[in-house]
């Protein structure tokens, strides 16, 4: 290859992969095996003691998954990555490495609903406490940090309301406190936003969405930015203190700027068990090859649809950061390279009934609870995901009775608009 750093589209196709050394297969093979034969007793001992890199058991490493991990690490500009069975499994893996019982972390109150549930309820069982703040004002985060705060958690583009986070300002607060800024980059993907460039320390993804991109496989990933000194304080004993099960090895001291990823693998994946299937790694890898092409089309279509809906009589408002009059437009210009993503919300003048009518009348759009598919998707949160909440709670969560969420696909924009037009005028 030419003597230059490969560009994003080249990395999306090639990073981490070579023709299979055993067979010459050009596509990355699916290593659908649970376990790997040792060369001899000494090699087995070295693998178990973390003195050598190699495959033991697919819960911890797998060659197909390793290509996926290397590729995403390259696209994000991180030092290493660790794949998990889902985005939520990856989030559990991150916090398992950082937190001890009684610790807390500060999170933006505008997050994917599933993350709000995970943090509010299941994390409490580990005695991990979330402190919610309005992260639009970064000072709120600084004010919320306590001696027990181990991390800050935000989304680059928050699902679903098109909120854009001021990553650089929040990263400065994290640096001053000596704690990591974790960015959930699911809605942006590294094609639109590379949080490490702006000072973030850990990036996570639900690979289930735009990264895989075709709505066929669950997956998640943690990417290590390699830019935090885990031994600067005694806040992170899993990284800075000897590990009894690995002959007193100290993970950060031994593995340096990819120590966080190693801990997520040899402690998190090993003990929590949320490993991705090699078959899913294969499908997601194939999806990532076309990520730049798909994101260009997703973003161009989303802008056209948002402009069309902004001018429509039946629509009260459109919240899409790609629109010039959106309050987050300036942050979108600063942090997003090729567009403002493809997920946004609209409010209907006709309220709850109009929301039900729209999701019942669309023909090409699919009415379901997902985002980031090639296909255009629609959901009315008030009658589905947020049904159990009061109207007041729904509105606070950005899911008032009149709100509909769209995930714009890569079909022809004219056909997407025509489907919305017929559904909005259906009698
Ligand atoms: C879907 C999603 C998750 C959770 O990922 P799963 O793969 O569904 O577990 C986390 N964050 C965001 C922003 C998401 O959209």
Image: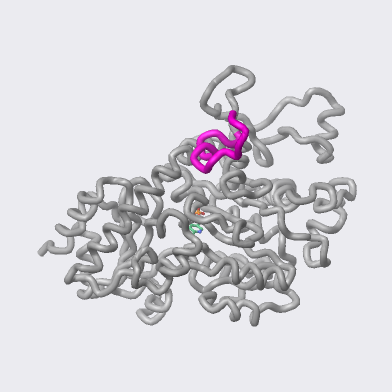
Residue 224 locus on image (x, y percent): 67, 52
Residue 407 locus on image (x, y percent): 35, 56
Q: Residue furthest right?
A: 248
Image quadrant in which you'd find residue 120:
bottom right
Image quadrant in which you'd find residue 71:
top right
Q: Is residue 319 visible?
A: yes
Image vertical order of residue 274 relative to residue 64, above or below: below
**Front in this rendered view, residue 21 or 164:** 164
Q: Residue furthest front?
A: 3
Apparent side of residue 12 relative to residue 38 in the rendered image (left or right): left
Q: Is residue 103 visible?
A: no
424 inside magenta stretch: no
**Front in this rendered view, residue 95 or 108:** 108
4 inside magenta stretch: yes
Residue 25 locus on image (x, y percent): 54, 21
Q: Quadrant of the C terminus?
A: bottom left
Q: Which residues are magenta?
A: 1-16
Q: Residue at x 19, y 68 (%)?
A: 312
Apparent side of residue 116 relative to residue 408 in the rendered image (left or right): right
Apparent side of residue 379 relative to residue 67 in the rendered image (left or right): left
Residue 252 locus on image (x, y percent): 81, 53
Image vertical order of residue 49 relative to residue 401, above or below: above
Q: Residue at x 60, y 53 (%)?
A: 90
Q: Residue at x 72, y 72 (%)?
A: 176
Q: Quadrant of the N terminus?
A: top right
Image vertical order of residue 121 relative to residue 79, above or below: below
Q: Residue at x 57, y 18 (%)?
A: 24
């Amino acid at each position: 290859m030419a003597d230059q750093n490969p560009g994003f589209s080249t990395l999306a196709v090639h990073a981490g992969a070579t023709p299979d050394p055993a067979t010459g297969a050009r596509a990355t093979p699916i290593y659908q095996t649970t376990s790997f034969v040792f060369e001899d007793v000494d090699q087995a001992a070295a693998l178990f003691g973390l003195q050598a890199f190699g495959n033991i058991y697919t819960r911890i490493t797998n060659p197909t998954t390793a290509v996926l991990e290397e590729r995403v690490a390259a696209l994000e500009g991180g030092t290493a990555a660790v794949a998990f069975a889902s985005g939520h499994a990856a989030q559990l893996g991150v916090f398992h490495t950082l937190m001890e019982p009684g610790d807390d972390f500060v999170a933006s109150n505008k997050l994917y609903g599933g993350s709000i549930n995970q943090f509010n309820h299941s994390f409490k069982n580990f005695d991990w406490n979330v402190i919610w703040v309005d992260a639009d004002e970064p000072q709120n985060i600084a004010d919320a940090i306590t001696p027990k705060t181990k991390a800050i958690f935000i989304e680059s583009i928050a699902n679903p309301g098109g909120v854009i986070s001021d990553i650089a300002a929040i990263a400065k607060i994290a640096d001053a406190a000596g704690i990591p800024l974790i960015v959930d980059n699911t809605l942006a993907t590294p094609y639109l936003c590379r949080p490490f460039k702006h000072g973030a320390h850990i990036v996570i993804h639900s690979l289930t969405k735009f990264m895989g991109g075709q709505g066929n496989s669950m997956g998640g990933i943690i990417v290590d930015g390699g830019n935090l000194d885990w031994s600067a304080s005694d806040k992170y004993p899993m990284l800075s203190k000897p590990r009894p099960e690995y002959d007193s090895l100290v993970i950060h001291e031994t593995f340096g700027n990819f120590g966080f990823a190693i801990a997520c693998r040899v402690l998190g994946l090993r003990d929590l068990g949320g490993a991705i299937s090699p078959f899913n790694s294969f499908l997601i890898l194939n999806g990532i090859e076309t990520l730049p092409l798909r994101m260009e089309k997703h973003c161009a279509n989303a802008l056209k649809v948002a402009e069309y809906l902004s001018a429509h009589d039946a629509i009260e408002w459109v919240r899409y950061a790609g629109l010039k009059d959106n309050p987050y437009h300036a942050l979108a210009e600063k942090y997003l390279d090729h567009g403002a993503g493809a997920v946004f919300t609209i409010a209907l003048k006709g309220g709850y009934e109009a929301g039900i009518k729209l999701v019942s009348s669309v023909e090409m759009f699919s009415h379901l609870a997902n985002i980031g598919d090639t296909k255009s998707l629609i959901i009315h949160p008030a009658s589905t995901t947020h049904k159990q909440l009061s109207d007041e709670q729904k509105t606070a969560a950005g899911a008032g009775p009149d709100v509909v969420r769209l995930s714009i696909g890569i079909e022809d924009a004219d056909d997407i608009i025509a489907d919305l037009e017929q559904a909005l005028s259906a009698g």
